[in-house]
Image (cartoon, rainbow, N blue to C red):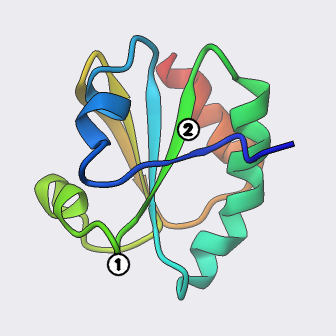
Amino acid sequence: MGAATVAVTDATFDAEVRKSPIPVVVDFWAEWCGPCRMIGPALEELAEQYAGKVKIVKVNVDENPDSPATLGVRGIPALFMFKDGQVVSNKVGAAPKAALETWIKSAI
């Protein structure tokens, strides 16, 4: 089975995130970021759990600097919730799965 989260690039950001018919959680991360790797498995599980209701995508900030720069991302992991193409909520830093789930549920 493939990953439940979708890898998004600067080139696909608008199509995958801003034009999505369902809410999108964007995880800005990097390979070298320990806390990013810590929340990865929880995000994969939540992506499966909320499939069809919420899309969870990952943007590697090293390979795609434009999207995080546009949103003013300063630290990672940084999670942004988009609804109808707009940022409705954001969260910086690692959090346990239960906290991530509560945050996602509050926005859908």
Query: In percent of the image, x 69 and y 22: which residue is there?
Result: 51
Q: Is label 2 in a helix, a strand or a loop?
A: strand
Residue of label 1: 62
Q: Quadrant of residue 9?
A: bottom left
Badge 1 density bin: few <14, some 14–19, many ≥20, Cα 10 Å: few
In the foreground, 7 or 30: 7
Query: In percent of the image, x 26 and y 28: which residue is there?
Result: 18
The three-letter code of the residue at mark 1 reads Asp
In this view, 48 is above or below 93: above
Residue 30 is marked as none
In the foreground, 13 or 101: 13
Q: Earlier in the sequence, mark 2 or mark 1?
A: 2
Q: Quadrant of residue 46?
A: top right
24 relative position to 51: left or right: left
89 relative position to 41: left or right: left
6 relative position to 16: left or right: right
Query: Where does the image place residue 78, in percent across and percent down from the top left?
Result: 41, 60
Q: Quadrant of residue 74?
A: bottom left
Q: CA distance from mark 2 to mark 1?
A: 19 Å
In the foreground, 105 or 37: 37
Query: Where does the image place residue 16, in percent across and percent down from the top left?
Result: 37, 32
Residue of label 2: 56
Query: Where does the image place residue 27, in percent across and percent down from the top left?
Result: 47, 53
Badge 2 density bin: few <14, some 14–19, many ≥20, Cα 10 Å: many
